[in-house]
Image (cartoon, rainbow, N blue to C red):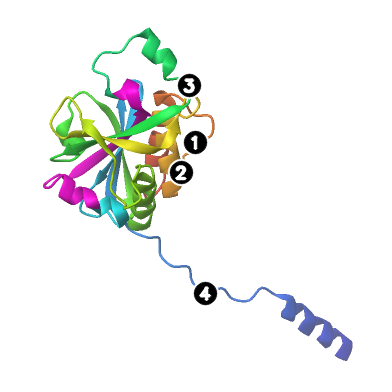
Amino acid sequence: MKRRFLLLAGLAGCASPLLPPEDPPAPMVATIYVLDHEWHTEISVPTDLLTGGLTRFRSIFPGAAYVSFGFGERLYFQKAQTGAVDMVSAIFPGPGTVLTTALAGAPSEMYADVEMVPIRVTQAELDRLADFLWESLERTPNDALVRLGDGKFKGYVFYGAAPTYSGFYTCNTWTMDGLDRAGLKAGAAGVLFAYQVMDAARAIARRPGRS
């Protein structure tokens, strides 16, 4: 009988300890947008909740509710007119650029004919995305942004990009990297085309708790 009691006591000692209750899921505090400009995708973020270096854009674009960021090949992206030679040249590795677009409202309010996917995010996810966007911007040794020039519309500004653009690291690969960096588990590997990005964005937006 004593031996049986000791055996039961030993089994009880191997039982899993009671775990403390899990913290409630972090609240969704903001909506980011993934925009599809036909072959090119961008990420649009709300300015009021930005953290880190990206807060600089509040003074660059005062009054902007959202700022969109898109990555591209430096020369091709800034040309008003492009041809076949430009497209072929953009395949080879070269300097990149980040096009920033100031929006007075959410993209859903500002664009009538642009495909987009809104994604609800937590503050931590937005913070990580902001870090990724900031690190994508080329900066001088004294931490100044490398401003390349204005785009063809008011509120469009080109900045130097830290990453190198190539046919294997496109604007769409970059967009997926940003979603991955935010912690949204988009799956950037192998993505080159806009439709792949938008399919992934829709899948993220459909996940439980994102509505």
Q: Secondary structure at mark 2?
A: helix
Q: Which one is nearer the viewer's eye here, 194 or 202?
A: 194
The percent coordinates of residue 80 (x first, y second) are 23, 17
Q: Badge 1 is on which residue?
A: 188
Mark 4 surroundings within 10 Å by alpha-carbon count, few (fewer than 14), some (14 through 19), many (20 or more): few
Query: In this view, which residue lies farthest toward the top?
Result: 84
Mark 3 surroundings within 10 Å by alpha-carbon count, few (fewer than 14), some (14 through 19), many (20 or more): some
Residue 92, disc: 3
The percent coordinates of residue 190 (x first, y second) are 53, 29
**Upstream in sequence: badge 3 or badge 4:** 4
**Range of residues picked out in magenta:** 56-77
Whether the magenta-drawn stretch holds residue 63 is answered as yes
Q: Secondary structure at mark 1?
A: loop
Q: Badge 4 is on which residue?
A: 20
Q: Are marks 1 and 2 in contact (CB under 8 Å)?
A: yes
Q: Give the distance between the C-alpha atoms of the residues marked 1 and 2, in whole angstroms.
A: 7 Å
Q: Badge 2 is on which residue?
A: 180
Q: Are marks 3 and 2 in contact (CB under 8 Å)?
A: no
Q: Give the distance between the C-alpha atoms of the residues marked 4 and 1, in whole angstroms.
A: 35 Å
Tell me the amino acid under the disc marked 3: Phe
196 w.r.t. 159: above or below: above
83 w.r.t. 142: above or below: above
Residue 149, disc: none
**Residue in the picture at 38% in, 47% down:** 135
